[in-house]
Amino acid sequence: MTKIRRYFPKILLTFLLIFLLIGTELSLLVQHNFLTYKAFETVTNQQNLDEKAYSALESYFKSRANSTGIPAEVYLNAVTQEDMKQGILSSVSEAFDYLHHDVKTYAFTMDFTTLEASVTEFFNQYADKNGYQKDEVFQQKVQANIEEAEAKILYTADTFKFGTIAEHGWLTKLRKFLDIFKKIMTVLCICTGVILILLILCCKGNFSELLYWLGLTGVISGLLISVPCLYLLRTDYFSGFVVKDMQIFSAVTGYLTYLTKTTGLTSLVIAFLGAVSLNLFGLIQKIKNKKQTTAE
């Protein structure tokens, strides 16, 4: 009974510390890694989203040429793969400016000066060649064609669909949630610190015993998160998602894979540190037992 009373507070504190550590780890990852421009830039580079987005544009304008008679080069010569990459990253930076700074609206666009000039030149040459009058109806047709092309390019460059998210009002809700989330993260960090201090006090200066409980906390919390992450990666779970556009599919699955890998690796590091603490505890105990045996 005495042993139970002695160990119960430490078991309870360790149990609480395990889940607080998981919450703190995940909240810090979300705040400083997952919801950052850098994370989306990394996914963009890893998944070659600019190449896939440009390939989607090529397919669209080439197939459209059959029905409109406008050569795909009119558009593709005015928009490069590098332009698409800058557009993708611009859509991300605009979203995070809105989320983290005092920006009133999410406004993503690209520089279409070259495109507008290319389309206008094509229509002017076509009109001159075929004797069409460049009246108001003609100008409206040119403008409508430009706007349609720009809309398609913006849609294709918005691989992470921040535009759709903003259109449905979810980006505004996310910004409000982030303010609350920061407070939750602060509370988690404080609670984790308080429980850790209480555990240290319960161990009453016994360093080896503290290593045991901390090691147990690290191993259990690390494995609880890393094992599911490793399962998702091992089974290639995200590849089963169905998304029509390849660049959007790669963006979504690439980002989810990035989250899973980062979380899994971070948790494995915590589990490894916990295992090291347990081994140190065992080593210290062996040394103590050896000293006691020698003394006897």
Image: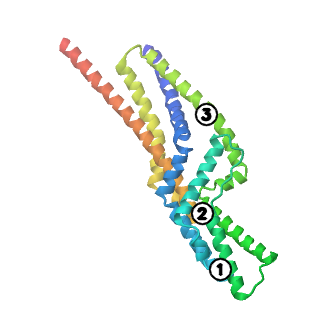
Q: Which residue is mark 1?
A: 70
Depth-wise, is mark 3 or mark 1 nearer the camera?
A: 1
- The disc label shown at residue 61, or none: none
N-term-proximal mark, 3 vs 1 = 1
- Would residue 266 be seen by someone viewing this image from the given angle? yes
Residue at 34 percent of width and 21 percent of height: 208
What secondary structure is found at the residue carrying circle 3?
helix
Residue at 65 percent of width and 57 percent of height: 109
- The disc label shown at residue 243, or none: 2
What secondary structure is found at the residue carrying circle 2?
loop
Query: Where is 233 relative to 190, above or below?
Result: below
Q: Position of residue 6 (x, y in %)?
A: 45, 15
Q: Nearer the viewer, residue 147 or 174?
A: 147
Q: CA distance from mark 3 to mark 1?
A: 52 Å
N-term-proximal mark, 2 vs 3 = 3
- Find out whether the residues at labels 1 and 2 contact each other: C-beta distance under 8 Å: no
Q: Position of residue 46 (x, y in %)?
A: 46, 56
Instruction: Look at label 2 and name its amino acid.
Output: Val
- The disc label shown at residue 182, or none: 3
Instruction: Look at label 3 and name its amino acid.
Output: Lys
Q: CA distance from mark 2 to mark 3?
A: 32 Å
What secondary structure is found at the residue carrying circle 1?
loop
Residue at 33 percent of width and 25 percent of height: 281
